[in-house]
Each structure stands twice: as C-alpha cells, then as structure tokens.
Amino acid sequence: MLDNEDAQKMIAAASAALSETSAQTMLTDGIADAYRSGVAAMEKTGIQAVVRSADTDDRTARPNLFTVTGQVWLDNPTLHQEVFGPLGLIVLANSVEQMVELARHLEGQLTCTIHLDEGDHAACQKLLPVLERKAGRLLANGFPTGVEVNDTMVHGGPYPASTNFGATSVGTLSIRRFLRPVCYQNIPKALLPKDLVG
C-alpha cells in the first residue's frame, strides 16, 4: 500500500484488532513449528514489528504483524517467502510505480486483492496487467479465500500454485486429492466392497 496517512490509520486499526485476538490451534505440530520459524526469520531481517505475540511451545499460534518499506522488501528475498499462519507483512510503497515494481517481484500466488475506490482506477490499471500473470484469482475489495464449493471452482494459478485441477483444494474436484486408487484383482465378488458390487 502507499505509505500515507490512510496507511497509518489502517495499521493502527489492524494492530488494535490483532492485539485482542486469542491463540488459535494449528493443524499439526509441524505447521506450528514452521510458523514459529517463519516469524523468527522475519525478525532476523530487522523489520518493524507492529504486533508481536509471544511464542508458545504447543500447537497454538498468535498473530504477528510487521511493516517494511518497499525498498527493503525488494532488497530482501527472505521477506518474499510465505509464512503459513496468522502473520501479516505490510509493505509500504513510496509511489504507484514502486507498487508495480513490488508486484513484478511477487512469486506465483493463489490470489491477489486490490482495495480501491474510483480514485484508484488509474493506479489499478497499471497493476492489473502484472497481477494477472501472478495469480489464479484477482479480487477487488474482498478477502480470500472465500470460495463457493461447486463444479467450476478450482484454486490454481502460476507456480507454485497449479493449473492442474487434480491439485485444487476447493471445489468438487478437490476430493481427488484425497482419493487413492485400489485394484481388486481376482477378488471374489462376495468379498468386494459394496460400492463396487453395485
């Protein structure tokens, strides 16, 4: 976002809201450990912590929020890495041109969101051609990953996402990620699963 008074108001509001958020349980110990490692990696870069929650030793995670200037982000590839969990990084750009440059350095994403009003349309026209090559879904004034589960919804995009429908984590095709084919060769009909006998 552009580094201006509105950005500072948004940071203050986000900080206040996150400071009241309780710890959430992560899916696995490994995911929780990876989150803590990601937070530590952010801190090693020396960027400013707006909200810094205490680490826990269990599977819970508390929110962390950092800010950084656009130039520091561009100069430090560690900051480009995704940290899965409640970690936010606000990159403050000094101009629309720097925002476009930041977008050019994004790796493949599942989604990209632009928050704008009519006064931002000119800037958005500069960003969209870059973002459409970076993400499988572009949003305006919304928040991912609210998706409808239906036959036409997939969650893909450029690397490291995938355009392979079999790798989608949403939509009705996502069930394929959890299927494992099994061949019942010469198994007597009386022993076959009911779904196969029909």
Image (cartoon, rainbow, N blue to C red):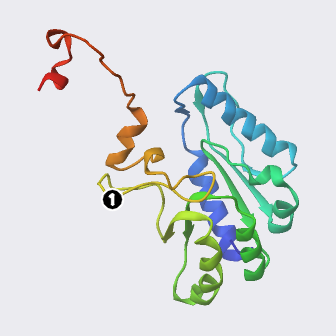
Q: Position of residue 180 (x, y in %)?
A: 39, 28
Q: Is residue 54 something one can see in this rendering? A: no
Quarter the C terminus occupies: top left
The three-letter amino acid code for the residue at tag 1 is Thr
**Residue 58 vertical position relative to residue 71 in the rendered view, above or below:** above
x 71%, y 62%: residue = 106
Local SS, label 1: loop
Quadrant of the rendered structure where residue 187 is? top left
- Residue under label 1: 152
- Residue in the image at 38% along x and 31% along y: 179
For the N terminus, the quadrant is: bottom right
Q: Is residue 168 above or below residue 126?
A: above
Tell me residue 82's x, y (percent). Answer: 68, 48
Decide if residue 40 is on the left or right side of residue 158: right
Given residues 81 and 133, the one toward you in this image is: 133
Identify which residue is drawn at 30% across, 16% down: 185
x, y (%) of residue 136? 52, 62
Residue at 43% in and 37% down = 177
Give whichever of 139, 57 is nearer the camera: 139
